[in-house]
């Protein structure tokens, strides 16, 4: 079966570029908020029927070309013995690098619900729609571990990198190995594409990115039999280095025009990069911005349309419709 999202990541010529939206399964959807009123985030993630339902909600409304499995970048850590809560982001005890190095193996049985969710989603999804599996990039996951949750500047990670680069590299190696096992499990269950969300990697300077982020991201994505997307928002200063990760496609945020980002990335597929704020404007502005985006990629094979980061929770549904229709028309 030819799935346009998979084809685009192979850089096959297509009649129109495929589209999906980061965070498409989430709080801007009334049906998501309704379900979350009855179930906690962790309950929704770990119950395959609920996670599959949430994954399918945006597809029913808007028919994106990919369905991203509902889970979190921190989900596999719970299967490595790390306790956490969500409020709304992950909250956990701050870990030292030594504690991260001592974390247990990933117990795949304890994330079996993700495989089951993928099976349920595939059964209900239109044939041409791709299942998108994902994981957090090791640097990003390490940042949440050492910080104990979200943070403005993630100074715990940035100081750890400076204080002890060798222990940081060792911790990243462990996380890269478990991330790779977790992604391989999702591919085995039927994911057509995987994305590594390295949301915080852009906090690092170029040389640290090259020394620590690239090997960890590369190892996370090694030997997977499906197209792989690497996405590090706020990492425009590293675009020319990212090809060393060896992914098939690269997500770019809205800060760098997509044509310029593409020439810095090289011969790869590129995903993005409408500013999520565009979807807070009005349908005519959205159409104008989509025209500009598509003019910049000019039908070049290998473009996957997406936002430059996750959709904002206050986005009106009609604006999502305007976005999807503008790309399709
Ligand atoms: O209902 C709620 O309040 C929960 C909000 C929520 C959602 C919808 C969280 C907590 N996680 C998710 C799902 C999620 N998270 C998905 C699957 C759904 C989809 O994309 O449609 C994905 C891919 C993620 C990935 C994720 N979680 C990232 C990377 C992506 C990005 O946007 O950069 C990050 C940084 C997280 C951490 C996290 N989990 C949740 C929140 C609110 C946050 C970020 C805020 C924080 O740091 O506190």
Image: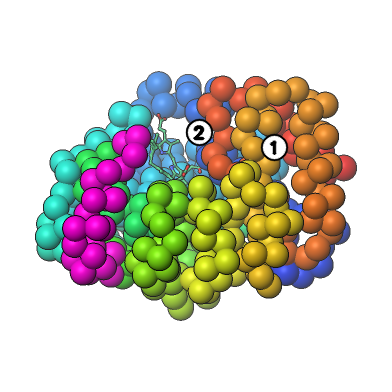
**Can you identify the residue that label 2 sits on?**
26
Residue 184 inside the magenta-drawn segment? no
Q: Position of residue 89 (x, y in %)?
A: 34, 34
Residue at screen point 37% across, 63% down:
208
Query: Which contiguous range is marked in magenta?
Result: 151-174
Which corner quadrant of the image does residue 227 belong to?
bottom right
Q: Can residue 104 be seen in this view?
A: no
Proximity of marks 2 and 1: CB atoms separated by less than 8 Å: no
Locate the C terminus and report the quarter of the image it occupies: top right
For the point 45% across and 26% down, the residue is 35
Residue 62's disc is: 1
Splitting the image into 4 quarters, where does residue 47 fall? top left
Q: How many labels does the image show?
A: 2
Q: Is mark 2 within 8 Å of ligand 1?
A: yes
Main SS category, magenta section: helix
Query: Is tag 2's residue or tag 1's residue first in the polypeptide sequence?
Result: 2
Task: Please state if 284 lies on the left or on the right of 277 as rendered.
Answer: right
Number of other residues with Cα within 10 Å of mark 1, as a class: few under 14, some 14 to 19, many 20 or more: some
User: Looking at the image, which residue is at 24% across and 51% down?
Assistant: 159
Rendering coords of residue 78 (x, y %): 24, 50
Does residue 313 sit above or below 94 in this rendering?
above
Ligand 1 - quadrant of the structure image: top left
Q: Is residue 225 visible?
A: yes
Q: Quadrant of the N terminus?
A: bottom right
């Amino acid at each position: 079966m030819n799935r346009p999202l998979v084809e685009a990541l192979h850089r096959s010529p297509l009649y129109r570029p495929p589209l999906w939206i980061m965070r498409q399964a989430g709080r801007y959807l009334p049906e998501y908020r309704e379900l979350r009123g009855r179930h906690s985030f962790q309950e929704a993630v770990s119950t395959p029927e609920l996670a599959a339902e949430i994954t399918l909600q945006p597809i029913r409304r808007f028919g994106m070309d990919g369905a991203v499995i509902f889970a979190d970048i921190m989900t596999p850590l719970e299967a490595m013995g790390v306790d956490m809560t969500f409020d709304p982001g992950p909250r956990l005890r701050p870990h030292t690098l030594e504690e991260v190095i001592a974390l247990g193996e990933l117990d795949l049985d304890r994330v079996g619900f993700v495989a089951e969710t993928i099976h349920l989603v595939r059964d209900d999804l239109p044939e041409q729609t791709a299942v998108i599996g994902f994981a957090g990039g090791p640097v990003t996951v390490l940042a949440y571990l050492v910080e104990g949750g979200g943070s403005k500047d993630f100074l715990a990670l940035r100081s750890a990198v400076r204080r002890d680069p060798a222990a940081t590299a060792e911790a990243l190696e462990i996380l890269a190995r478990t991330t790779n096992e977790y992604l391989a499990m999702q591919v085995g269950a039927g994911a057509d594409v995987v994305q590594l969300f390295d949301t915080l990697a852009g906090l690092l300077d170029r040389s640290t990115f090259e020394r620590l982020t690239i090997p960890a991201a590369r190892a996370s994505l090694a030997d997977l039999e499906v197209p792989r997307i690497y996405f590090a928002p706020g990492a425009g200063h590293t675009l020319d280095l990212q090809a060393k990760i060896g992914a098939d496609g690269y997500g770019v945020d809205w800060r760098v025009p997509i044509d310029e980002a593409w020439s810095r990335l090289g011969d790869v597929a590129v995903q993005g990069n409408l500013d999520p704020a565009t979807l807070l404007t009005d349908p005519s502005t959205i159409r104008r911005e989509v025209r500009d985006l598509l003019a910049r990629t000019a039908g070049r094979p290998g473009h996957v349309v997406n936002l430059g980061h996750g959709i904002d929770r206050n986005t009106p549904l009609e604006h999502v419709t305007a976005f999807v229709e503008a790309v399709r028309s």
